[in-house]
């Protein structure tokens, strides 16, 4: 287990965090394994590690074995939990996009019981925690097959009351006069205020930001409450705009490089409930674009 985590993450430190042990314990276990095998598994480089040729071969074998074990455990667990279909996604995607639509799937397939795991920490598709994952990113992940749903674009939004108190916005730089609500994200392709202003060749010091939140969903709630201007991801805030709970305050928008995907773990694609949900969400994605 220690070797599999270190090989997959390419880091003793990250493997230790995932396993809940110290980095020294991981390093010691790898050293003992290498002594027992009689050959090195990793190249210790400056601030990083790389698998040796034999290490890569063992990593492939161990990953395959863990995937088979995870699938078996997941299948046994699934049979003991009333045939649930477990879907993992972020809090913002769950609350803003999935939950407002998912009742149509439940009505069409009342025999399929859904369980939605909403958390911003990404779930490994092979861990057995979820049957499907909805992710934002580049679409190439080693733990499952990703099917494209949609790209997005990002633009400033705020509450109608906040917008009515603002002056005219003729240039993206005019936004710097107001409270900008920002949020954290671990996603490499996620767009924050710094990235958004950079798309229009504007440098912005962090001192210009107003409220800062830990999660994107919180920044949207802050905008709804009139705390300032947040970045609205078009697909996520679509209904809030239609309901006029949020308003778009400028035509300037930044298209995203990455997109949203539904990720199916290996050996799950043959399941009928998985196929039904994948087809349903792809239909919903097409409808939301029109």
Image (cartoon, rainbow, N blue to C red):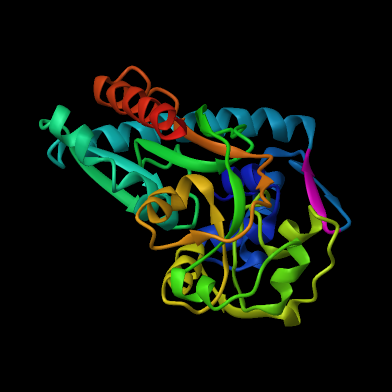
**Residue at 35% in and 41% down:** 130
What is the x, y in percent for residue 92?
43, 56
Residue toward you, 6 or 78: 78
Tell me the quarter of the picture where residue 257 sits.
Answer: top right
What is the x, y in percent for residue 236?
46, 50
Tell me the quarter of the picture where residue 131 sits.
Answer: top left
Position of 279 relative to 245 (above/below)? above
Q: Is residue 27 visible?
A: no
What is the x, y in percent for residue 1?
52, 47
**Residue at 42% in and 39% down:** 133
Magenta part of the chain: 47-51
Would residue 261 appear left or right of 77 to someone viewing this image? Answer: right
Would residue 48 be counted in the magenta stretch? Answer: yes
Q: For the stretch drawn in magenta, what is the main secondary structure?
A: strand
Tell me the quarter of the picture where residue 16 sits.
Answer: bottom right
Q: How many numbered discs?
A: 0
**Residue at 86% in and 57% down:** 201
Would residue 35 appear left or right of 248 to someone viewing this image? Answer: right
Position of 156 relative to 64 (above/below)? below
């Amino acid at each position: 287990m220690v070797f599999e985590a270190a090989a997959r993450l390419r880091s003793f430190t990250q493997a230790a965090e995932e396993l809940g042990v110290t980095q020294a314990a991981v390093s010691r276990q790898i050293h003992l394994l290498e002594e027992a095998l009689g050959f090195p598994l990793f190249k210790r480089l400056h601030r990083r590690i790389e698998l040796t040729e034999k290490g890569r071969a063992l990593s492939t074998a161990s990953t395959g074995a863990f995937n088979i074990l995870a699938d078996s455990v997941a299948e046994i667990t699934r049979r003991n939990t009333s045939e649930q279909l477990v879907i993992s996604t972020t809090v913002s995607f769950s609350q803003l996009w999935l939950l407002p639509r998912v009742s149509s799937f439940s009505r069409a397939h009342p025999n399929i019981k859904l369980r939605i795991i909403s958390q911003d920490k990404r779930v490994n598709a092979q861990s057995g925690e979820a049957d499907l994952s909805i992710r934002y990113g580049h679409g190439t992940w080693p733990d499952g097959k990703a099917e494209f749903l949609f790209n997005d674009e990002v633009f400033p939004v705020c509450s109608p009351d906040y917008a009515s108190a603002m002056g005219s916005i003729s240039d993206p730089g005019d936004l710097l006069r107001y409270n900008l609500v920002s949020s954290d994200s671990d996603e490499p392709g996620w767009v924050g205020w710094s990235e958004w202003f950079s798309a229009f060749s504007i440098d912005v010091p962090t001192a210009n930001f107003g409220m800062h939140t830990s999660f994107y969903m919180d920044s949207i709630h802050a905008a709804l409450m009139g705390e300032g201007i947040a970045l609205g991801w078009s697909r996520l805030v679509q209904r809030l705009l239609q309901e006029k709970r949020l308003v778009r305050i400028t035509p300037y928008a930044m298209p995203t490089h990455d997109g949203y995907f539904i990720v199916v773990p290996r050996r799950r694609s043959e399941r009928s409930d998985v196929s039904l949900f994948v087809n349903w969400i792809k239909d919903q994605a097409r409808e939301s674009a029109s």
